[in-house]
Image (cartoon, rainbow, N blue to C red):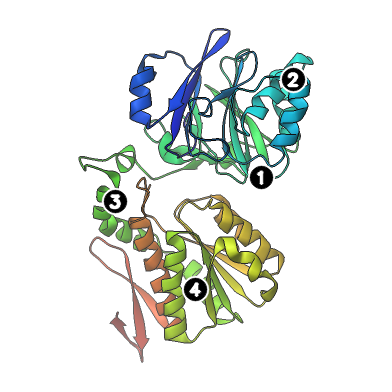
Amino acid sequence: MSIGGGYDSVGIAVIKGNYIEVRKGKGKIAEVSTRLNFDEVNGTTAIGHTRWATHGKPSDENAHPHTDCTGNVAVVHNGIISNFLELKEELISKGHVFKSETDTEVVAHLIEEYLKLGYKPFDAFKAALSRLRGGAYAFVVAIAQEPNRLYFARNTSPLVIGIGNGANFVASDIPAFLEFTNMVIVLRDGEYGYIEPGKVYIEKDGIPVNVEERVRLISWTPEMASKEGYPHFMLKEIHEQPFAISSTLAGINEKEFDDVVNLLLNSRKVLIIGAGTSYHAGLVGDYLFTSMLGLDTHTIISSEYKKYVNAINEDDAVIAISQSGETIDTLVAVRAFKERGAKVIAISNVIDSAIPRESNYVLYTRAGPEIGVAATKTFTTQLIILTILALRLVLPWVGWTRVSIGISWTPSIRCRGSFRTL
């Protein structure tokens, strides 16, 4: 199991009989793996994490996974626990000894406390979750007395399940297990549960979720998530841009685009939101919509949404751009603008991710997995979607013709009974 994406430390925890073996340390993955012999750890149930510091300096002690006093509970975590100081003080007063400066460790000790009170592991896990306040988090927990089970929970931070053949996986992103399966369940906020080798169980508010209805087949292949002979992923993904553009064009749904065009044409103003590279794609869209159509369009960084939320109402449209569909700042902004009545259009690369699910309309890019930190093909495909939208907006009588060889769709203008391909 892999979760997270930082670089300051790395660690693994493996259930071995009636105890959990933990190996972790400060440093890059390859260096720590060699130093601590990750390849020599045997077991069938394991968790792992690569960390980017949020609480505490990079150190061996602050590396994930984190354990309780007994060493029988191990936790990996992405995100923030807002009330961890309050919980930590309470647990220290009950005799718990903390080994790290992180907020994550409180979860392991909370579960330990409930286990000591006689709770069964799943009930102890749920009781610990109920004590957490605020923040955005995703957890995976191993408990020694349940050697074939891993517990998980999601609140805003992304978490996905991979359905394998005799083995199941949970991770923060699909490529972590793509070598083993492309059948996935994208977890939703407030969901929690457990995986076993042949079982996935999900609950929300105590009510079981129908797992079979949630399984999705991802078209990505393991080769897409490998370097395929390139020295690094960024170079590979630069060279994949023509294919990513072709796939995005081929996947265009005419009706979905036309519905979005009609919405934008009838909106009072259009707000484009995004973070990082997606924000810069939004700036291009802003330029196209404003210069070509004169639409009242504004692009903002998602984290700045509070400055604009009171100026938005039910007559407005919001375009939310997110490669992963799970960008926390953008997701929070989407929810705020929807509360004001705005219609939201998602542009995302991941089917059934959080932002598309919570939007009114979805336009998918189809760039495949992007591993490199600097966006390449996903940025290009975002620009393709925005450009086609702009062309359809400026030419309301535009039709669609299929390009016969290889790559998919081009817009064309209907001119007095004839067609002219753009």
Rounded to the nearest angstrom, the CA distance separating label 2 from label 4 is 56 Å
Return the mark for residue 135.
1
Amino acid, disc 3? Glu
Q: From the top left corner, tell me how far across and down residue 238 is, in percent.
A: 27, 54
16 and 399: which is toward the camera? 16
Residue type, numbered disc 4: Asp
Q: Residue at x 52, y 83 (%)?
A: 295
Q: Nearer the viewer, mark 2 or mark 4?
A: 2
Going from N to C along the chain, the mark reached first, 2 or 4, is: 2
Whether residue 176 is situated above or below residue 284 in the rendered picture: above
- Give the image location of residue 63, x and y in percent: 50, 29
Q: CA distance from mark 1 to mark 4?
A: 38 Å
Residue 92, disc? none
Q: Earlier in the sequence, mark 2 or mark 3?
A: 2
**Of the residues under marks 4 and 3, which one precedes in the sequence?**
3
Residue 258 is labelled as 4
Location of mark 3 (residue): 237
Q: Earlier in the sequence, mark 1 or mark 4?
A: 1
> Which amino acid does the dot numbered 1 rest on?
Gly
Using the image as rendered, state which of residue 395 and residue 132 is in the foreground. Answer: 132
Question: Is the C-beta separation of discs 1 and 2 under 8 Å?
Answer: no
Residue 29 x %, y %: 37, 30
Instruction: Decide if residue 137 is on the left or right side of residue 124.
Output: left
Which is more foreground, mark 2 or mark 3? 2
